[in-house]
Amino acid sequence: MTLFAAARLPREILFGKGQRHALPAIAARYGSRAFICTDERLSKTSEFAEILVGLEAAHVDTLVHDQTLPDVPRDSVGGCIAGAKDFKPDMVIGIGGGSCLDMAKCAALLLSHGGELQDYYGEFKVPGPTLPVIAVPTTAGTGSEVTPVAVISDPERTLKVGISSPHLIAAVALCDPDLTATCPPSLTAIAGADALTHAIEAFTAAKRGADADLPQRHVFIGKSALTDHFALLAIRLLGRSLEVACRDGSNENARADVMMGALAAGCAFGTAGTAAAHAVQYPVGALTHTPHGLGVATMLPYVMRYNLSTAAAEIAEVGAALGLPRQDGNANGLADAAIGEVARLFNAIGITRTLAELGLPEDKIDWTAEQALGIDRLIKNNPRPFDIAAMRRLVRAAYEGDMAASAM
């Protein structure tokens, strides 16, 4: 196949210690009224107060919605924008974790185009540009600051749903690792494991060809030369620093590596997409109500083992990016070591080892497999195909902690 590459990214990405202080000047370029989406905890911090003072000094009026909830419940978005309609903002600023950034994307969407969120479920349903979004993450995991998707929970659906469109990509991603300094070790671990899963699934995703129509019909289009670049950068940074950041949250270099890793992983999977680990997590998360990052990371070593027969070369490159020594002419050996290193790292930072430990009922294994197989946008991205028997074996292996069985 000839060289193919694709990437959809914000107009501007700013990263580094203290970069949050640039927010007033950036916002002023987009107008004089900013609607801010955050959560109750963050709204009470000194950092948030400092941001508001800076915006005021830049003559940017603000309206704050500080009731963002985890997983963005569908009906909460209507309440969020109710007061903003009369405010008539020029931009929406999301400050917080992935849910706050997704809330900002949803708010910008409905303020711009009206209707209800369910009108936009799926791919390419957003009819045009939205109000510009400035994304300021305070955790290092979801990559939502650079991706074209917002994930919400809908009470009428068992699984979480996504709105995917290039129009949802933030205008500006403003990433200051100092904002992650107060993240507790458990959140650092789960968010960072989510980011590493994004990077590895994007790098090992199927190559889906260079069809000119593909990026026009689908948001997630498989791996390419550009997404590989971002994914390997993320794997290197997270491999060397995630464990350190979990152990010592005051280590500024480790915090910066992990945040840059999450950003780069978002740049990768925002175009390449993710695969089977995410497909299984959607029904598992619905049943166990456990954090998304914890679920995908629990699944990742089993999915890597399942994919080994098809993607040994790519998994070996993952191992090299993780810092494992190359084995002359033995890609399979390095790939096997890579799977072991991912499992070791996740165990070291407290990620659950099995779906049973995550709380999945054994009598829901078959249902989980059926639901996962039905998430076509993720399953078709997996480098090794699935049928229902293979998916059941994978879920059963991850439930029982049988790594060897996941390869069958």
Image (cartoon, rainbow, N blue to C red):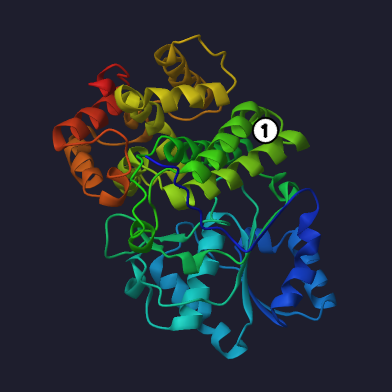
Provide the residue designation for mark 1: 245
Q: Residue at x 29, y 36 (%)?
A: 360
Please state the horizontal and vertical placement of residue 138, each as a whole percent of the image: 65, 52
Reply above or below: 48 against 313.
Answer: below
Q: Is residue 157 visible?
A: yes
Query: In the depicted view, which residue is nearer to us: 267 or 151?
Result: 267
| Of residues 299 and 65, the one drawn nearer to the viewer in this rendering | 299
Residue at image coords 82%, 71%: 53
> x%, y% of residue 5?
47, 48
Quarter of the N terminus within the rendering: top left
Is residue 348 among what the camera can see?
no
Give the quarter of the image for residue 249: top right
Looking at the rendered structure, the secondary structure element under dot 1 is: helix
Q: Of the residues shown, which amino acid type is indicated by label 1?
A: Ala
Q: At x 46% / y 35%, what residue is drawn? A: 200
Residue in the image at 39% along x and 68% along y = 74
Q: Determine whether 396 is above or below 275 in the image.
A: above
Going by the image, does 129 lie left or right of 309? right
Q: Is 209 placed left or right of 65 in the picture? A: left
Pick the front one: 95 or 404: 404
Quadrant of residue 128 within the rendered picture: bottom left
